[in-house]
């Protein structure tokens, strides 16, 4: 199976703009999670979507939002960009089998730079 | 609140030497613990999980609930083990993971 894909791979934006990142999960995976990775804060959970519904949410401001489509593809949006939003944004998909935590399969990430 | 601590940012060992990466967690419920690894220019990937109780690439990890630890060990490090290692805690419905800060392992020849 093809792995998790993320587009675009690199983005440069200026403060105040908004950005949309896209993630296509592995075929058959219904759970998609987003993480922000920075040198200072490490890997931080943003949110998880399952069957088009947000199932978990991390401690990020409302400027960060996401959605999931019926084909499980997901997008995340960041509005009113700040310099501190510069980070690698990782998407992970999971088969979400019942019973326990599932292995998460990570994409290559989208590198966002805010100037 | 859930928290994962990896006290070592960098571990440098010689090839053939043992390596142990420390991981401590904070969670009042019944956790699921994982080790993820990121090799150079590769994606973050699962190395092992505590419920499987298996050895992957010679690595093992034992969950110690009394000490709230999940240390990763390998008796004889290889150069290909050089990578970034993350300990992660799953402790809520769904697939949310709380990651530690990561430990970079450098295995010298």
Image (spheres, rainbow, N blue to C red):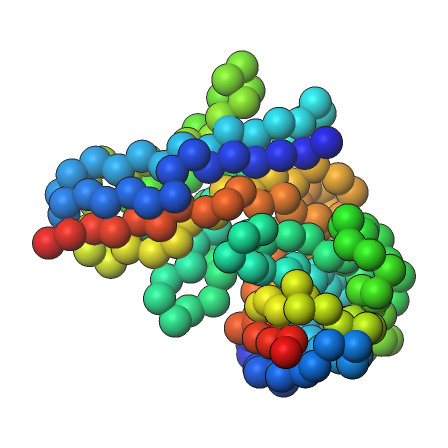
Residue A47 appears left or right of B32: right
Taking the image as shown, residue A112 lies to the left or right of residue B37, namely right
Res A80 → quadrant: bottom right
> Looking at the figure, which quarter contains the C terminus of chain B?
bottom left
Indicate the quadrant where residue A72 lies: bottom right
Tell me the residue at 77%/49% (across/down): A59
> Residue B96, image x and y in percent?
70, 48
Front residue of B93/A19: it is A19
Whether residue A56 is situated above or below residue B91 in the rendered picture: below
From the viewer's perspective, is A98 left or right of B45? right
Does residue B47 appear in the picture of this structure?
no
**Residue B48 at what x, y percent from top left?**
46, 45
Q: Is residue A32 above or below residue B18?
A: below
Q: Quadrant of the N terminus of chain B?
A: top right
Q: Is residue A40 left or right of residue B79?
A: right
Counting from the top left corner in percent of width and height, residue A99 is at: 71, 42
Which residue is depicted at the point 24% across and 58% down? B80
Which image quadrant is residue B21 in?
top left
Please report the residue visible at 82 percent of the width from the left and 73 percent of the height from the top. Answer: A79
* In the image, farthest residue toward the left: B109
Total numbered labels placed on residues in the image: 0
Residue at (54%, 53%) from the top-left corner? Answer: A40
Q: Position of residue B36 (x, y in %)?
A: 48, 51
Q: Is residue A34 visible?
A: yes
């Amino acid at each position: 199976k093809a792995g998790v894909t993320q587009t675009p791979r690199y983005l440069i934006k200026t403060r105040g703009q908004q950005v949309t990142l896209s993630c296509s999960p592995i075929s058959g995976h219904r759970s998609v999670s987003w993480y922000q990775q920075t040198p200072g804060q490490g890997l931080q959970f943003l949110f998880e979507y399952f069957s088009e519904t947000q199932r978990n949410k991390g401690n990020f401001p409302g400027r960060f939002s996401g959605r999931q489509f019926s084909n499980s593809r997901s997008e995340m949006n960041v509005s009113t960009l700040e310099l501190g939003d510069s980070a690698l944004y990782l998407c992970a998909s999971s088969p979400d089998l019942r019973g326990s935590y599932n292995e998460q399969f990570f994409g290559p990430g989208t590198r966002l730079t805010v100037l | 609140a859930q928290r994962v601590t990896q006290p070592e940012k960098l571990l440098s060992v010689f090839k053939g030497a043992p390596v142990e990466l420390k991981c401590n967690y904070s969670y009042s419920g019944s956790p699921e613990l994982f080790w993820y690894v990121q090799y150079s220019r590769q994606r973050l990937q699962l190395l092992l999980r505590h419920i499987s109780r298996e050895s992957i690439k010679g690595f093992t990890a034992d969950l110690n609930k009394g000490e709230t630890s999940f240390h990763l060990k390998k008796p004889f490090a290889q150069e290909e083990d050089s990578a970034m290692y993350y300990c992660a805690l799953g402790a809520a419905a769904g697939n949310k993971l709380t990651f530690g800060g990561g430990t970079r392992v450098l295995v010298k020849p």
